[in-house]
Amino acid sequence: MSAEASRAHPAPTPAQLAQGWLRDAPADLLAEIAPTTRLVTYPDGECIHLHGDPAQGMFLIVRGRVRISRTTGAGSELVYSVLRAGEWFGEIALIDGGGRTHSAHAQGSTTLILLGSAAFTRIVDGYPASRWALMQQLCERIRLIFDEVEHASEMPAEARLAQRLLLLARTGDGHMVAASNEELGRMLARSRQTISKYLQAWQRAGWVRCHYRGVEIVDAAALRMLIGNTPS
């Protein structure tokens, strides 16, 4: 952990914890748990944890973004997703006791809340409804995986990019995708130049708007039509 990541912060507030699977948790439980959590800031590119590391807790993104990836046997990085503020990650290793299923790196200066394993156990034991909320979070991510892999290997790169943008947008506000062209390329095993070519063409067509490290979906129907018109 870097010097910045280990820098002291004020303790998180109960209101900061009340997001995602803890959105409806009792106020008294969050007030009990909040002092046991801590805010941690990572500089751009800093490793939060590596694939296979033992789990010390799960994380909530307060500010910034987190790149979720694995390294292939050939040494290249395969990016699965880029998470943003308000999203939790790291629950799988806490549930099954195994190592981390992926690596996580900060994208820009990123502040997280670390919910330790003891606090996690206290919540799921003391607030049974949290188990269902956590399962819903996991099920949503599993559904995204199934949607993505269905026929993905047979799709041309253009249709796969459209599909990935729509899937990533579903985890946010439905329109904004917080990922750079390079990150999208890593997700699809394509070059940044290839991704840029498609996005620039779609921007001219009025389907998307390109932003710094992000893409705004303007015409989701056009992207879905592109996927639907892919030859089987």
Image (cartoon, rainbow, N blue to C red):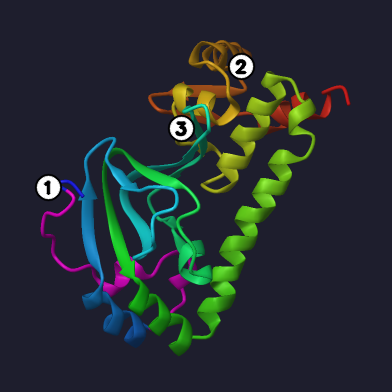
Query: Looking at the picture, which amino acid does disc 2 mark?
Result: Trp
Tell me how far mark 3 sits from mark 2, CA to CA: 16 Å
Image side of residue 226 versus residue 30, left or right? right
SS for dot 2: helix
| Residue under the point 75% across and 29% down | 153
Please provide the residue range marked out in magenta.
5-26
| Residue under the point 42% across and 80% down | 121
Q: Does the magenta-highlighted stretch encompass residue 74?
A: no
Q: Nearer the viewer, residue 114 or 19?
A: 114
Label placed on residue 3: 1
> Which residue carries the number 2 mark?
202
Query: Looking at the picture, which amino acid does disc 1 mark?
Result: Ala
Q: Position of residue 132 (x, y in %)?
A: 59, 76
Tell me how far mark 3 sits from mark 1, CA to CA: 27 Å
Quick one: quadrant of the C terminus? top right
Label placed on residue 179: 3
Label 1: how many Cα within 10 Å (few below 14, some 14–19, many 20+): few
Query: Looking at the picture, which amino acid does disc 3 mark?
Result: Ala
Name the front one of labels 1 and 2: 1
The rendered magenta stretch, by its main secondary structure, is classed as loop
Q: Position of residue 70 (x, y in %)?
A: 49, 40
SS for dot 1: loop
